[in-house]
Amino acid sequence: METPPSLNGLETDKNLIRAYLGEILASKKYEEYSKIAEKESLISIRDLFAETSRNEIEHSKLFLKKLKEHKTPRTPVIVDFSITSKDDTIDNLFSSISEERFENDHLYPEFAKIAKQEGFGDVSDLFCQISKIEQFHKLKFQKFFYLLKSGKMFKRDDICIWVCKNCGNIEVGKGPPLKCPVCGHPQGWFEALGDSFIDVFEEEEGEGKKKLI
């Protein structure tokens, strides 16, 4: 069995380490953002941040796997994983959109290009795949940023089906009740069924619409 080429001393080695540590930090950050959203009773956004946190920690494991596959000797690295966040979910969404956009538009495409140039096609492919995932993260964050910014999180122009994320109760209307009539949980536990990422994205950036980001 052929031994994979070593990354030692190459730019791709540094980029994998940077990506590995960055994804760990992102996971911890989104975990903190999830707790803040829960304090604000924004349960759909709490769940989004928690899910994204799990995604990011899996990304870090994939990057570490590539480092191990190419048997690069590791030097201990001391990293400050302290998180700076605002106690406001809309600000945290805005920050998250910017960071996911940077990873998708610039960071990982550049890392993929360098890895390919240095002869590591498998690493290049991984960076490309993770970049696509970060793009989807960005779109989901944009969705909820738009809904909060426009005041449409719990107030729509059209009739919607609203589902309580605690007990599963279903309500129909332009907005959910202030609290669930079944379990008593507050309005923030309701989510509109069938929210479309594409519709929200087009409304945010479509012709004649003012961009929020």
Image (cartoon, grey):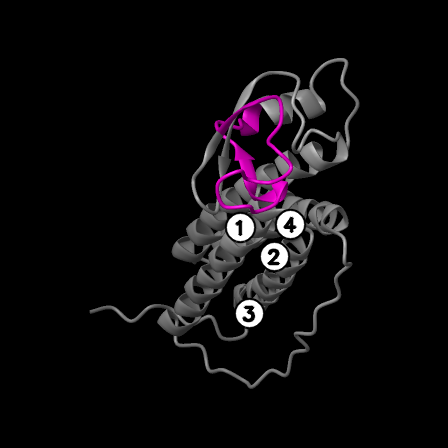
Q: Give the image location of residue 117, x and y in percent.
A: 51, 53
Which residue is at the front of the view, 88 or 207?
A: 88
Give me the residue at 54% from left, 22% from top: 160
Q: Residue furthest top?
A: 208
How far apart are the two marked residues, 1 and 4, measured between alpha carbons?
A: 11 Å
The amino acid sitting under disc 1 is Asp
Residue placed under numbered mark 4 in the picture: 41
> Which residues make up the magenta segment?
171-198
SS category of the residue bearing label 1: helix
Mark 3 and mark 2 lie on one chain; the one further toward the N terminus is 3
SS category of the residue bearing label 3: helix
Residue placed under numbered mark 1 in the picture: 47
Mark 2 and mark 4 lie on one chain; the one further toward the N terminus is 2
Residue depth check, mark 2 versus mark 4: number of the one nearer the observer: 4
Q: Residues within 10 Å of mark 2 (few under 14, many from 20)?
A: many
User: Is residue 186 depicted above or below 65 in this figure?
Assistant: above
User: Is residue 136 depicted above or below 194 in this figure?
Assistant: below
User: Is residue 13 depicted above or below 54 in this figure?
Assistant: below
Label the magenta part by its dominant secondary structure. Answer: loop
Q: Give the image location of residue 57, x and y in percent.
A: 49, 63
Mark 1 and mark 3 lie on one chain; the one further toward the N terminus is 3
Residue placed under numbered mark 3 in the picture: 17
Q: Are marks 3 and 2 in contact (CB under 8 Å)?
A: no
Residue 40 within the segment the image draws in magenta: no
In which quadrant of the rendered view does residue 4 lie?
bottom left
Which residue is at the front of the view, 153 or 122?
A: 153
Residue depth check, mark 3 versus mark 2: number of the one nearer the observer: 2
In which quadrant of the rendered view does residue 190 lie?
top right
